[in-house]
Amino acid sequence: MSSEPKRKVKAKADPTTSPKPRPKPKIGVFKFASCDGCQLSLLDAEDELLSVVGAVDIAYFPEATRTMLKGPYDIGLVEGSITTHHDAERIQEVRRKCTTLITIGACATAGGIQALRNWKDVDEFIRVVYATPQFISTLKLSTPIAEHVPVDFELRGCPINKYQLIELITATLAGRKPNIPTYSVCMECKRKANVCIAVARGIACLGPVTQAGCGALCPSYDRGCYGCYGPMETPNTASLTSQFRILGQTDDQVSRAFRSFNAWAWQFRKASEECKRT
Amino acid sequence: MSGRGGRTITVDTLARVEGEGALYIKMAGDRVADVKLRIYEPPRLFEAFLRGRHFSEAPDITARICGICPIAYQMSAVHAIERALGIKIAPEVRLLRRLFYCGEWIESHALHVYMLHAPDFLGYQDVIEMAKDHRAVVEKALRLKKIGNWIVQLMGGREIHPISAAVGGFHKVPSKRQLRELVSDLEWALEASLETVRWTSTLQFPDFEQDYEFVALRHPEEYPFCEGRLVSNRGLDIDAAEYEDCFTEFHVKHSNALHSMVRGRGSYLVGPLARFNLNYDKLPEVARKAALDVGLKPPVKNLFRSIVVRAVELVFACSEALRIIAEYEPPEVPRVEAPNRTGVGQAITEAPRGILFHRYAIDDQGLIVTAKIVPPTSQNQKRIEDDLREYAAQLAAWPLEEATWKCEQAVRCYDPCISCATHFLKVVIERA
């Protein structure tokens, strides 16, 4: 058990044979209820893809390869939310097989757009879509991965930012903290020297309460932020709600603004329920 | 396994498709007893939670059905809603939407041709393994894909779930100068696409022709994206509003995606093969010539040749993008006003994988009352099963492992997007 014998073994190694290369870290990509977009971000990293696959061993990634190696995996990337009994069991197994478990995207970190069912009667929803509802097996709630198993890092976004994903993988392999900011979209707007569309033009914008990561895309394209990256670290949703009301938004409109791709993230969820009540 | 020459072909997780499904084929001697394309991607119930949302949210919400073809969802949504509201878009916006779609076709077809499908023909597990022997080919594929993504990124801010599409037009449109910056890369992409046609035509194709009903949009002047009548090689010729009268959806126990049929007939095929066969005369000269040079003429009835047809569509998309950029003038306003108004509207557009139908009913507050979405893979599902019934019989004498791989390859010819149709492709062939 002590480290002594290992050192001895090293010292004894025959200097004439070349050192055995360290095995590459194994990565697995696992999918639950989602659109595939976040895992596609890996294939969309065209400039970096061949270097990334040179540095790691893609052991399980059905969207890209027929090769499916058994775990354990050093890093598991999990996309999608839990919406079925089968998936609720499968995520336990995935967690057991992964040393580091990273969730990618709004579905895996907040339940995704499909979490809109969480406020409704899911059986009614199924009857709307399917002629034979008894064939369909689904849970009442769409929930994020962290409600089921411990998660080592949650990467936000709908979709995620591919450069943040590469930074996260690199940092994890190097054993350092990833450089992924938790401040708001407003910071990104200021850096781009965007004129504030909320202040100057009265456009409802979720930027002040939404985590950065997209590069303040929507305000740069003349529209309000709609919250793809979920709540920032300490969002003042109450203040933003009153600001939206001053801009003439109805309670329903404010509630809908909070209820989109990160609707089930507790801060947005609370904000959406509060404006319905008052 | 053996017992009177029967067996089961099982692929537990069908790889290199978008989403998750399984395939199960049961053989009794040379005869195929049962084929099931099982789609157990959990249902996400979009049509239900769209109810009560404002129509302006539909392009962003429905984009999330599929990370591979979000633009298709945005385009079908905006066209259907514009029809419900009775809005006319500016001709410049119409052109920009075609350019936006060109970007998605280039990105999606380059991904499928080289990274998802070519490894089957060359005997590799994936593109990473293929890159070890064919690095230059893979690098070219990545650059081609990236150029498609650039168009999308420039117009929509990002490749996946772009943010600029809106009912009535775009939130913001690019300048002439911005678009002109794409020209030299697109010229390279056009050349690379022509090489792709030549390269894919040298692959080995199984001898497998079927009598398909091909269904695609047809427009009097152009190769179709967002407009035209829905036609088939068996006399179908309808407007999008008549779609639900002529096609029927049904629910089978083994799939979370609804199956689709032409009413009174049966399965049909949508996607590149259908578009090419029905619109060959509308292809630009450069694409038609590229096809002819490799001996590709309609009707192409061999499913496996769809990889060459996708390459021809790459040529089309690059040349169309160049044409649009050359004549582009920004519209006076990026989008026309979209007032809240009661109405019902349908639209069909050509996603990379085939036609995508949307219908919305909207109330006087602009809220969606009902929504219906029929994605291309759901429409191809029954046709995939019909093909495998024929194809697996041809493979009865093959070793199980190779037969299984061949069946997977056949499914991949459809470039199935199971996330769209609902997801996990798992192939099982049972020979009993």
Image (cartoon, grey):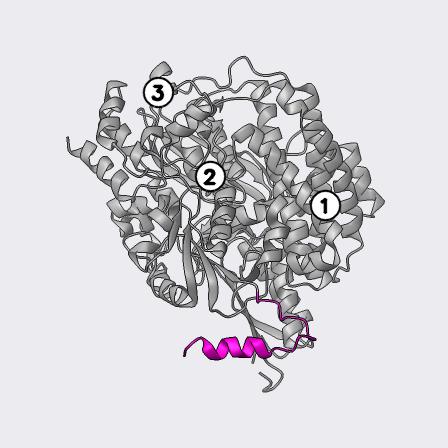
Give the labeled residue for mark 1: B140
Query: Mostly what secondary structure, the magenta segment?
Result: loop
CB atoms of marks 3 and 1 within 8 Å:
no
Question: Label 3 vs label 2: CA separation?
Answer: 25 Å
For numbered disc 3, what is the local secondary structure?
Answer: helix
Q: What residue type is labelled 2?
A: Ala
Q: Nearer the viewer, mark 3 or mark 2?
A: 3
Question: Label 3 vs label 1: CA separation?
Answer: 43 Å
CB atoms of marks 3 and 2 within 8 Å:
no
Q: Which residue lies furthest to the left in this view?
A: A278
Label of residue A205 in the image:
none
Q: Which residue is drawn at 60% across and 43% down?
A: B352
- Give the x, y percent position of residue B162: 50, 34
A73 lies left or right of B279: left
Is any atom of residue A173 visible in this view?
yes
Label of residue A198 in the image:
3
Is any atom of residue B260 visible in this view?
no
Q: Which residue is drawn at 75% across and 46% down?
A: B196
Label of residue B63 in the image:
2
CB atoms of marks 1 and 2 within 8 Å:
no
In the depicted view, which residue is nearer to us: B57 or A205?
A: A205
Residue B232, picture quadrant: top right
- Give the x, y percent position of residue B219: 64, 31
Chain where mark 3 sits:
A
For numbered disc 1, what is the local secondary structure?
Answer: helix
- Give the x, y percent position of residue B365: 30, 25
Chain where mark 2 sits:
B
In the depicted view, which residue is nearer to us: B249 or A231?
A: A231
